Image: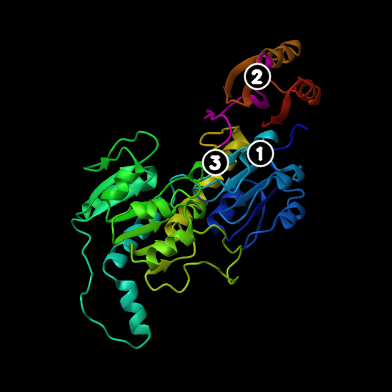
Amino acid sequence: MAELNPPPARALLLEGIHPLAVERLRSGGLEVDLLPGSLSEEELVERLEGVSVLGIRSKTQLTRKVIEAAEDLAVVGTFCIGTNQVDLGACLDRAIPVFNAPYSNTRSVVELALGQIIILLRNVLQKSSLLHRGEWYKSSGTAREVRGKCLGIVGYGNIGAQLSVLAEALGMEVCYYDVEEKLALGNARPCRTLDELLARADVVSVHVDGRPRNRELFGTREFGAMKDGAVFINLSRGFVVDLEALREALESGKLRSAAVDVFPVEPRRDGEAFHSPLRGMDQVLLTPHIGGSTEEAQENIGAFVPDKILNYLEMGSTNLSVNFPNLQLPELRGAHRVAHIHENVPGILAQINQVLARRDMNVSGQYLKTNDRLGYVITDVGRDYDAAVVQELEAIPRTMRVRVLY
């Protein structure tokens, strides 16, 4: 059905999203419900009745079952970098755009990685554990400076590239590996293969995305290819690393130490039990998925994602959507705007214009963008139109959704 009275009325925000997001969405005319934790599949199905905007972080799994049951859902915001917790294909099938925050917590993740590198190379973690047990060992032992060490960055995207610059400023040599060709920043050097990086790096820091090809990217073979006594850090995705293989590499002494912030299975709420084969290892720094959990990052995300959601609801803009064709639209004055979402097949645009021509409606602006599955048309017209026009647009074969914006 067409949406004749935008913006949608209700938003549900989960996992303790920053209050700024609530403020932004309410200022856009939405009612907002805020919950501190994530919800199960069954709970989501129940809570999404009548909800048009859903905001989540990394723990909530937005499955096809949930998406198909959420009849009123119009747009999804992931208040984090990753979107692998969302069935993007199912959202496309329902003509639901998904927005994330690809840059907002980059600095926070990079700073944590730098802190972990220093702590692990200096053996701070082990020294702290000994003191907590009442044992004093001041010897420098195998403590090392970061200066002059080689940092190998796996995944040279926004986070990897910024980490490269800051690590080099600390005096580290930097090499990186990425499946796509990326411009090297500073004096960083690209590696042709992952094995080349593993053989060179004193510290390996992983910053890959959540695509299926990265599942168990690091296992027994990869840890075996690393330098003896190297340090391993994962701040990317939990399923990237075989944790049993990592434990074996640490127990055998092949690796010096590790820091892990993300896990294959994570508790949905604070206070729930955490299980991992890495628990109890003094040489492992475990953190509860806090790479982007700083006040600054969450405030940035709390502003960025709601703005993208409201721009879609109010103007039709899909700029930076992770699954929709990207359209950045101008502000409209003195006209009316209608959005038509359809399967990407030939002839739809012509049929839209035929409907408007039959109704003697002059087009003042029109924008079309497609991807391999979906077409998105925004049409600005010079006068009011009624429900009959909308019904004709909805009746065009392969139409998925029609939205009347204003």
Residue closest to the eye, 280 or 292: 280
| Highlighted range, magenta | 323-348
Mark 2 element type: loop
Q: Residues within 10 Å of mark 1 (few under 14, many from 20)?
A: many
Q: Is residue 340 magenta?
A: yes
Q: Residue 351 at x, y = what percent?
A: 71, 14
Q: Residue 142 at x, y = what percent?
A: 23, 70
Q: Quadrant of the C terminus?
A: top right
Q: Is residue 261 left or right of residue 376?
A: left
Q: Is residue 11 left or right of residue 391?
A: left
Q: Is residue 199 magenta?
A: no
- The residue carrying mark 1 is 91
Amino acid under label 3? Answer: Lys
Q: CA distance from mark 1 to mark 2?
A: 32 Å
Q: Quadrant of the N terminus?
A: top right
Mark 3 element type: helix
Classified by dominant secondary structure, the portion drawn in magenta counts as loop
Q: Is residue 110 left or right of residue 325?
A: left
What label sits on residue 382 in the rendered view?
Answer: 2
Task: Please give the name of the residue rendered at 63% of the width and 27% of the height, measured from the top-left corner.
Answer: 373
- The residue carrying mark 3 is 308
Amino acid under label 1? Answer: Cys
Q: Marks 3 and 1: which is nearer the front?
A: 1
Task: Please give the name of the residue rendered at 28% of the width and 49% of the height, measured from the top-left corner.
Answer: 199
Q: Earlier in the sequence, mark 1 or mark 2?
A: 1
The type of colouring in the image is rainbow
Q: How many marks?
A: 3
What label sits on residue 136 in the rendered view?
Answer: none
Task: Please give the name of the residue rendered at 57% of the width and 27% of the height, measured from the top-left corner.
Answer: 332
